[in-house]
Amino acid sequence: MATLIDRDAVQDLVKQGAQLVEVLPAQEYAEDHLPGAVSHPLRQLDKEVDEIDRRRPVIVYCWDAA
Amino acid sequence: MAPRAAARLESLGFIEVLEYTAGKLDWLAAGLPTEGENSTRPRAGDASRKDVVVCGLKDRLGDVRDRATEVDWDVAVVIDENRLVLGLLRAKQLEMDPNLLVEQAMRPGPSTFRTYVPIKEMADYMVEHELDNAPITTSNGKLVGVLFKSDAIGLAASASAAARRMITAPRPG
């Protein structure tokens, strides 16, 4: 199961080389995303998975915890 | 959505998967920078006026009205010592008996709006709900400024509607 992290941990881990993946629809990514994040909407994740670096930690996020 | 994405990545063999549970809303609420179309457009916090007429619960209404009149405002925000929004005095309340205390006249628990809401969404909301002005606060309720409908409409003129709506429901305080 994925490790749950907060905002401070996101910032620390990104500095250490973690990659940020937004899984919301692409239009929402186009409007606003975290600095340096890439867009891989949930429905396209299987098709695009090879674009994600398996050697680095992956932080996924969406809109909120709901 | 993020939990499912994280689970799928793990099932596909990713070793170190982490989930930022509070997500983009938390990031925006903290006032941290973002990238994307909205990052170059004003948001409610940017467009709000900061020279707000503020007052305390025990102030005399007539004194607040005088201060508002001096700067040609028809709204004053009632705050506590930490700038938490407690109430609002619109034109109707400002015209009440000047000897009342603010707390006797104010509209308690007014709807407030967050700094990160794109100006287009604010403008549309204010038109739809006939709001001439709206208090803008941090996510923990501290006053940032007051957004005027005329300012919002002017700044939103060239913006298109966003996919993500950020005003969820009126938020007391």
Image: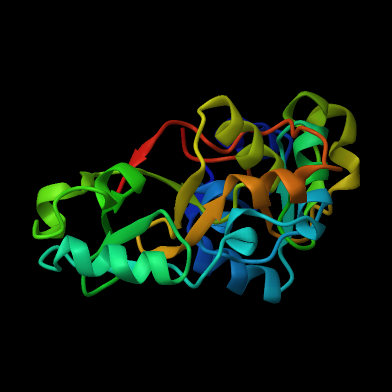
Q: How is the image coloured?
A: rainbow
Left or right: where B125 falls relative to A32:
left
- Residue B81 location (% of width, % of height): 21, 74
State whether residue B118 appears in this view.
Answer: no
Q: Quadrant of residue B159?
A: top right
Q: Nearer the viewer, residue B29 or A60?
A: B29
* Residue sitting at x 36%, y 40%: B171
Left or right: where B101 falls relative to B163:
left
Residue B75 vertical placement versus A47 (above, below): below
Left or right: where B22 falls relative to A31:
left
Q: How many marks?
A: 0
Q: Quadrant of the N terminus of chain B?
A: top right
State whether residue A5 appears in this view.
Answer: yes
Residue A25 vertical placement versus B115 (above, below): above
- Residue B23 location (% of width, % of height): 56, 48
* Residue sitting at x 14%, y 63%: B57
Left or right: where B53 falls relative to B120:
left
- Residue B55 location (% of width, % of height): 25, 68
* Residue sitting at x 10%, y 50%: B104
Q: Nearer the viewer, residue A48 or B148?
A: B148
* Residue sitting at x 83%, y 27%: A44
- Residue A37 location (% of width, % of height): 77, 55
Residue A66 vertical placement versus B94 (above, below): above
Q: Nearer the viewer, residue B10 or B112?
A: B112
